[in-house]
Amino acid sequence: MKNRSPLPIYTPQSPSLPNDKLMYKNTKPKNNTSIDDEQSARNVYIETYGCQMNVSDTELMSGILSQAGHRTVNNIDNADVILLNTCAIRENAETKVINRLVHLNHRKRRNEDLIIGVCGCMAQHLRDKLLEAAPYVDLVMGPDGYRDLPMAINAVTTGDPFLSLQLDKNEDYADIAPIRKEGIRAWLTIQRGCDKMCTFCIVPFVRGRERSIPLDILTDDVKRLVDEGFKEIVLLGQTVNSYNDNKHDFGELLWRVAEVDGVQRVRFTSPHPANATDSMIDALENCPQVCKQLHLPLQSGSTRVLENMRRTYTVEQYRDIVYKLRERVPQIALSTDVIVGFCGETEEDFRQTYQLMEEVRFDTAFMFKYSDREGTLANKMLSDDVSESEKARRLNEIIDLQEGISADINSASIGASVSVLVEGKSRRNDEEYYGKSDTFKTTVFPKEDTQIGDIVEVKIHSTTAHTLIGEIA
Ligand code: SF4
């Protein structure tokens, strides 16, 4: 592949506020390009970085490619096309991809027909700058451009890189059948994009406006997933509980998915505290298939910091949700996300976070030091003024706190029986299985005569901060 002419940039957008300032396409769907002969069919290897939403997008990309006659392969050595499906949440996620591209360029030097593409959030974030950093990349495609993949693969063989970076407020890929790996748990994207504007977050700029997939389409998808053998359905969205297809809210969706014949468990991630409605809590309380587990991102225990983050709730409101949940669903396991060292966070703000974590006693927490991301509102408007050493100290304090709380909560389940969906062989011992409890705790136990996909009762005899260990009850 040959000399390149100046870049035919499709529509690179400058990151700005969504809605009127980001350019959206208003038409959908485009016709999927299909290839007309076996010789044009390519072997495509997709490497996925980042969150579960990206894993789900990789399944979607596989579906689009397969519909057009291409094949996805598991061995990179057999690939004609290598796509990196990327994450932009943290700088080190992007650095990892740039390093990977350098490595892939060695492959390309050995095989000049190899096509290398960067897709997903990092592609949308860096846009044409990506080609400055890695000029050998053939294809740069944002999360709303995946329908263009078959056409892009054909187009880059002419020698020009292909950029597809328009956001599309109507694109929900509802008509595409993703190709999933076999298993017992299926992730189902019910919503794309995000309308919240948390100041630390790049997502609204790289994934665009929130769109919900109509409920009837989703229930048909769930029926298909059950037929394919999946036992547990995990509903996915950036703010999954703000789901609204103009006829149904998230609580109704939970009931309708749970009622599909053969669905044994339903989970969802990630909800936003501002959308923790009574209808969602009602489904958690009363719908037997909806697991008694909730990941409810807190981010900070200081209302002042929450305001700077534009999280749209106060600490009091967050606390009220927790108390209401615990009152109505006493066995619920709560997990959270916490950021320390956000712009302007004082020692007093941090103490409030620490105390709230002590008070709420989350089962688990994902804890991070704040890191400034170019393109976010915080990067433009706020000063990243907490020193790295101070961020590290704060982070270590809450990690120590949370490890103790997680271990205490788990040890309280010694002697109890938990219901576990069997997922596979334990990594440490072939004679043991592991699975997740209803409350999403990893549980390990001797196999006996259980099968993968069974739901079994396991009596817990010992625990760590992260695992329950027991025997079939
Ligand atoms: S809710 Fe906030 S943190 Fe979550 S994706 Fe939207 S902007 Fe990002």
Image (cartoon, helix red, strand yellow):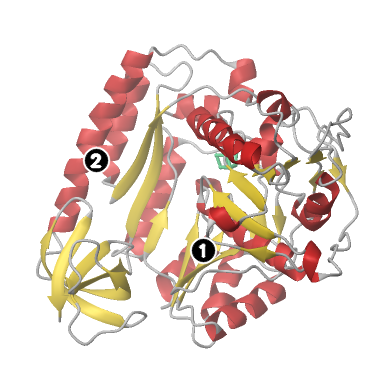
Horizontal arrangement in the rendering, residue 329 relative to residue 223 (left or right) = left
Q: Of the numbered discs in the image, which one, if any, rests on residue 280?
A: 1
- Residue at label 2? 402
Crowding at dot 1, Cα within 10 Å, few <14 / some 14-19 / many 20+, comes out as some
Give residue 250's quadrant in the image.
Answer: bottom right
Q: Say what secondary structure mark 1 lies in.
A: helix
Q: Residue at x 52, y 31 (%)?
A: 99
Residue at the (91%, 54%) spot, across then down? 27
Q: Is residue 160 left or right of residue 192?
A: right
Can you say which quadrant of the picture contains the C terminus? bottom left
> Which residue appears farthest toward the front when viewing the image?
110
- Distance, label 2 to label 1, CA atoms, is 27 Å
Is label 2 in a helix, a strand or a loop?
A: helix
- Residue density around tag 2, few if under 14, some if 14–19, many if 20 or more, within 10 Å: many
Report the residue at 41% width, 41% height from top.
337
Determine whether label 2 and label 1 are within 8 Å by CB. Answer: no
Q: Is mark 2 within 8 Å of ligand 1?
A: no
The answer to whether residue 205 shows anywhere in this view is: no
Mark 1 vs ligand 1: CB below 8 Å? no
Where does the image place residue 240, in percent across and percent down from the top left?
57, 56
Foreground pick, 255 / 447: 447
Residue 161: where, in percent of width, then height? Answer: 80, 38
Q: Earlier in the sequence, mark 2 or mark 1?
A: 1
What residue sits 78% from the left and 70% below the top? 38
Q: Compared with residue 293, is residue 289 higher up or lower down, i.e. above or below?
A: below
Q: Is residue 107 visible?
A: yes
Instruction: Note whether 448 is above or below 81 in the view shown.
Output: below
The image quadrant where one finds the N terminus is: top right
Q: Name the amino acid, label 1.
A: Met
Q: Which mark is residue 122?
A: none
User: Horizontal and vertical percent for residue 257?
Assistant: 56, 76
